[in-house]
């Protein structure tokens, strides 16, 4: 039996309707063994420039032999299609507003640079004062941003699925300005400084819409803060004239 050849690029049209890749054969074989890629999953081969069912791709068919149709149906019925990236279910990435400009293929490539983090309720994601090197996208769940003053908690804001935090340390690796705590079990996508640098170098077509999305959100936040500041000043001046 021949072993899979490395160096051949593949793309996978996954159950979440996102195209992942390109990846080399060893990674694809690992996904097959984890049952994230099934016999009827569509796979694109850069070598032949064609899409085929995974079980029909040379060097992959051997990994599906012995899996009966009844077993495949039982797995599908019990658990549904397995996510290609562990921890990310269909639709999760589409909740994140700053990724709205990416198409499905770009999302599939983007997530491969990142790390999925599962946070239990009440666990701290980041701690005030600690130097950070990553920002986080909230795929599922909810977190709160807090300050501890005289051993008492002050909640600054609550963030839900689709929002992000920690973006400043992505650029300057400075100290965190507040704690972030999971209000319930949450799924986060961690974007480290190292992953961000690699994204810019290897995939500028992904880095550009990502940065534009971050900038739009930060601009909206600054405009809202400026409005609150103006309203506070106007209220104070109106009160002084009475």
Image (cartoon, grey):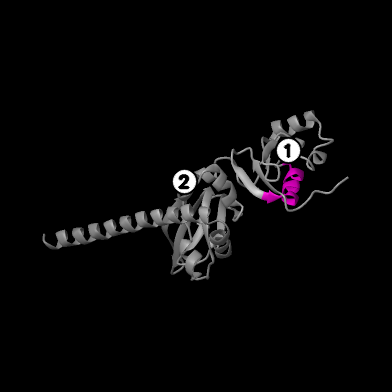
Q: The C terminus lies in which quarter of the figure?
A: bottom left
Identify the magenta region. Answer: 23-35
Q: Which residue is mark 1?
A: 54
Give how far across and how far down residue 144 sits, in percent: 47, 55
Q: Position of residue 225 (x, y in %)?
A: 32, 58
Residue 18 percent across, percent down from the top left = 59, 41
Q: Of residues 68 and 60, which is closer to you in this image?
A: 60
Does the magenta segment cover residue 29?
yes
* Mark 2, residue position: 100
- The residue located at (70%, 45%) in the rendering is 47
Left or right: residue 110 compared with residue 3: left
Q: Which mark is residue 107?
A: none
**Residue 232 locus on image (x, y percent):** 24, 59
Q: Specify which label sits upstream in the sequence, 1 or 2.
A: 1
Can see residue 80? yes
How far apart marks 1 and 2 lie (CA) works out to 30 Å
Q: Residue at x 53, y 67 (%)?
A: 132
Looking at the image, do the residues carrying marks 1 and 2 touch, with CB atoms under 8 Å apart?
Answer: no
Label 2 residue SS: loop
């Amino acid at each position: 039996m021949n072993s899979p050849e490395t160096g051949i690029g593949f793309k996978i049209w996954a159950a979440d309707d996102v195209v992942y890749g390109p990846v080399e054969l060893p990674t694809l074989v690992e996904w097959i063994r984890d049952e994230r890629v099934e016999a009827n999953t569509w796979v694109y081969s850069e070598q032949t420039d064609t899409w085929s069912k995974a079980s029909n791709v040379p060097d992959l068919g051997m990994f599906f032999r012995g899996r009966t149709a009844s077993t495949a149906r039982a797995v599908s019925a019990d658990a549904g299609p397995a996510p290609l990236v562990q921890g990310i279910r269909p639709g999760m990435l589409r909740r994140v507003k700053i990724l709205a400009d990416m198409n499905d293929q770009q999302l599939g490539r983007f997530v491969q640079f990142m790390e999925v983090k599962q946070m239990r309720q009440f666990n701290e994601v980041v701690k005030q004062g600690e130097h950070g090197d990553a920002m986080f996208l909230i795929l599922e769940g909810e977190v709160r941003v807090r300050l501890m003053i005289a051993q008492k908690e002050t909640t600054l804001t609550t963030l839900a699925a689709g929002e992000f935090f920690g973006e400043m340390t992505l650029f300057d690796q400075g100290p965190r300005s507040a704690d972030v705590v999971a209000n319930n079990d949450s799924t986060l996508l961690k974007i480290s400084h190292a992953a961000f640098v690699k994204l810019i170098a290897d995939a500028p077509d992904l880095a550009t819409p990502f940065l534009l999305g971050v900038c739009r959100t930060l601009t909206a936040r600054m405009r809202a803060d400026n409005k609150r500041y103006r309203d506070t000043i106007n209220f104070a001046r109106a009160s002084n004239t009475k």
